[in-house]
Amino acid sequence: MEKVLKTPIAEEEVRALKAGDVVYVSGTLFTARDEAHRVLLERGAPFPLEGLALFHCGPVVKKAGETWRVVAAGPTTSARMELFEAEFLEKFKPRVIIGKGGMGERTLNALSEVGAVYTHFTGGAGALAAQAIRGVKEVHFLEELGIPEAVWVFEVERFGPLVVAMDASGRSLYADLEKTVEKNMDQIRARIQGA
């Protein structure tokens, strides 16, 4: 299934998604890497995050006068945020997380509890991502955290494609893949030992 999600995204809309679905996001998307997660959890959010898309990203941006332009916006490895993500989801309720590489059991459980999904965006496709960003609406904690760690708020149109890799029903494509790999490894070991 392919679907365009428009922010603010309703919980029911996200709960209808299944691992393997392809989605695009239009509307408001914000970035937060590990330092930004920590700051937002400690101090609160300077704008409402519920129903938005959270992008694990340190964008490459360029300023022309008073206007920021996004040059590239590739995903950061999401495992870096595992320490914070369950609490972040419970406190702020973003509905879509965008990143790469997957997340752990605590995040998977929080996705189910809160009604959110983790989506995979292809690493190395930062220039493609930038094409879907129509503009920078706001930036927070820039002086304190620097460009990659700041919280950037983007207006996006059909940002994606994003693959739902962890859904609100508790299914993870990463866990499925791990089981398949382990089964294949068992067969390979048996063949080697039998040779």
Image: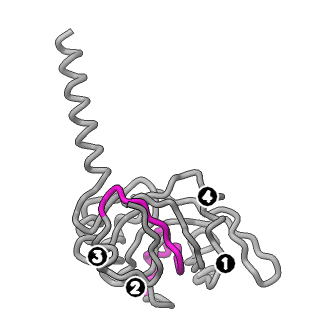
Q: Residues within 10 Å of mark 1 (few under 14, many from 20)?
A: some
Q: Nearer the viewer, residue 153 or 18?
A: 18
The tag on residue 115 is 3
Say what amino acid the circle numbered 2 marks: Glu
Q: Secondary structure at mark 1?
A: strand
Residue 142 x %, y % = 63, 79
Residue 79 x %, y % = 39, 58
Disc 3 and disc 4: Cα gap in Å? 27 Å
Q: Earlier in the sequence, mark 1 or mark 2?
A: 2
Q: Earlier in the sequence, mark 4 or mark 2?
A: 2
Q: Secondary structure at mark 2?
A: loop
Location of residue 180 by image quarter: top left
Say what amino acid the circle numbered 4 marks: Gly
Q: Residue at x 77, y 75 (%)?
A: 63
Q: Which stretch is magenta? A: 18-43
Q: Residue at x 20, y 28 (%)?
A: 186
Pointer 2: what residue?
50
Q: Secondary structure at mark 4?
A: helix
Residue 20 is inside the magenta segment: yes
The tag on residue 98 is none
Residue 153 x %, y % = 57, 80
Say what amino acid the circle numbered 3 marks: Gly
Quarter of the picture containing the N terminus is: bottom left
Disc 4 and disc 2: Cα gap in Å? 25 Å
Give the residue at the far right of this rendering.
65
